[in-house]
Amino acid sequence: MVRLDKIYTRAGDAGQTRLSTGEPVEKYHPRVAAYGTVDEVNAALGAAALHAEADMLGAIRRIQNDLFDLGADLATPDRGKAMDWDPLRIIAAQVARLEREIDAMNVDLAPLDSFILPGGTALAVHLHIARTLTRRAERMISDLASLDTEPVSDEARAYINRLSDWLFVAGRVANENGILDVKWVPGANR
């Protein structure tokens, strides 16, 4: 379990931080940017949770917890060296759970006949904001993984990809199963 006795350390004042491995890196390092953007997703989901009830609220809270797991995974690169502790990693079961939930939510949704705009209910809007941040996190994680010296697990990459799909479908559910979806009308304002 994590224990934080002191919130500020002054260690980052010069623009550096440490990964979970203890390795010092610049605060703009792609790995820090990736897990920092995952944290932004988590904060956006915290705002979405203010508008959620019952099953949706429970799912959002589970995902927020998973996002801390993902942040821990990204903050602990597997460089093939033995560690004194078992690093927390995203596992295939977390990805599979998102897929099951997407499939279950999608059952009552009409197929799309247009792209939809972020809108509708307050919950849907917050889920769409979280979705766009998730897409940014995915781009940053993919960029990180493209570097030969920066390993990222397949499960971490799959989780963030599946999460954006989950958030899209959840946004439609939050719009009364798509009834309140705001459809894009190409060229409507020409």
Image (cartoon, helix red, strand yellow):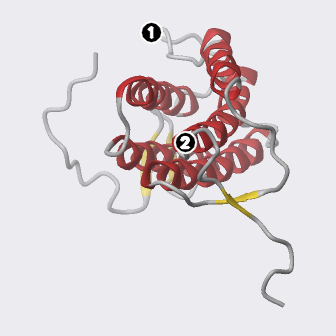
Residue in front for this viewpoint, 109 or 32: 109
Rendered image: mark on residue 105: none
Classify mark 1: helix, strand or loop. Answer: loop
Which quadrant would residue 62 be assigned to in this image? top left
Above or below, comparing residue 15 to residue 104 in the picture = below
The reply to whether the C-beta atoms of the residues labelled 1 and 2 are less than 8 Å apart is no
Which quadrant would residue 146 be assigned to in this image? top right
Above or below, comparing residue 136 to residue 20 in the picture = below
Residue in front for this viewpoint, 20 or 163: 163
Query: x, y percentage for residue 26?
Result: 52, 54
Query: x, y percentage for residue 111?
Result: 81, 38
Above or below, comparing residue 17 to residue 101 in the picture = below
Residue in front for this viewpoint, 15 or 175: 175
Look at the image and tell me in which quarter the C terminus lies. bottom right
Classify mark 2: helix, strand or loop. Answer: loop
Residue in view at x 20 percent, y 49 percent = 8
Residue density around tag 1, few if under 14, some if 14–19, many if 20 or more, within 10 Å:
few
Above or below, comparing residue 23 to residue 11 in the picture = above
Of labels 1 and 2, earlier in sequence is 1
Instruction: Give the distance between the C-alpha atoms of the residues marked 1 and 2, in whole angstroms.
Output: 49 Å
Give left or right: position of 77 versus 84.
Answer: right
Residue in front for this viewpoint, 50 or 180: 180
Rendered image: mark on residue 84: 1
Rendered image: mark on residue 176: 2
Residue type at mark 2: give it: Glu
